[in-house]
Amino acid sequence: MVLGMKALFAGSFDPFHNGHLHIVHRASRLFSELHVIVGQAPDKQSLIPFTERPHLIREVVHHYSNVTVSSHTGLIVDYARRNHIHILVRGLRLLSDIEYEQSMAWHNKMLDQSIETVFLMSDLEYRFISSRGIKELIKHGQDISFFVPPSIHDWIKNHGRQKP
């Protein structure tokens, strides 16, 4: 663990899936504090209401003593500044993620020179999991239990988003 270093892992997390959880697990071992920040993505069709996602994620990560979960609207750099966080953690699944993530890292760096982005490559078993793909499976009535933590699966099932 890098003592004294705080990091931030942000996303829309709609839904929070096992790939996200694996990044949280790994980042929580690298940094003394990890802030998981749920952001709004107004251009995306929401599966889980924005206000509900932090509660669901807290249930999943509650056993990590150095992880906190909250939400933020606006630029993530603003949240980082207010909380004195200089490390942004991003997961990379596939080659197609690299160009987008590099662009975001550059923009964040231009907004605040003290921000560094750390990329964690997804393990092979998580490389093809995406929130978009999960939503597509739900739309077609397929089982998503393999892709999401049990409490997330239960929430989706209990709220009429997936057929039992």
Image (cartoon, rainbow, N blue to C red):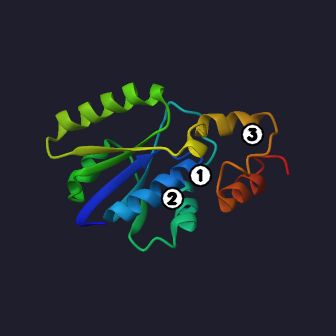
Q: Determine which residue is flagged by label 2.
A: 54
Residue 107: give its label.
Answer: none
Q: Residues within 10 Å of mark 2 (few under 14, many from 20)?
A: many
Residue farthest along the left direction in this orientation: 113
Relative depth, front residue between 74 and 100 = 100
| Amino acid under disc 3 | Ile
Q: Where's the N terminus, which quadrant?
A: bottom left
Whether residue 16 is visible to the viewer of this picture, yes or no, is no
- Helix, strand, or loop for circle 2? helix
Task: Give the quadrant of residue 60.
Answer: bottom right
- Helix, strand, or loop for circle 1? helix
| Cα–Cα gap, marks 3 and 2 | 21 Å
Instruction: Indicate which label's residue lies in the foreground, 3 or 2.
Output: 3
Residue 18: give its label.
Answer: 1
Q: Residues within 10 Å of mark 1 (few under 14, many from 20)?
A: some
Sequence-first disc among 1 and 3: 1
Residue farthest along the right direction in this orientation: 164
Q: Determine which residue is flagged by label 3.
A: 138
Sequence-first disc among 3 and 2: 2
Q: Position of residue 146 (x, y in %)?
A: 71, 50
* Image side of residue 3 versus residue 152, left or right: left
Mark 1 and mark 3 residues within 8 Å of each other at the beta carbon:
no
Instruction: Indicate which label's residue lies in the foreground, 1 or 2.
Output: 1
| Amino acid under disc 2 | Pro
| Cα–Cα gap, marks 1 and 2 | 16 Å
Sequence-first disc among 1 and 2: 1
Q: Residue at x 34, y 42 (%)?
A: 74
| Amino acid under disc 1 | Asn
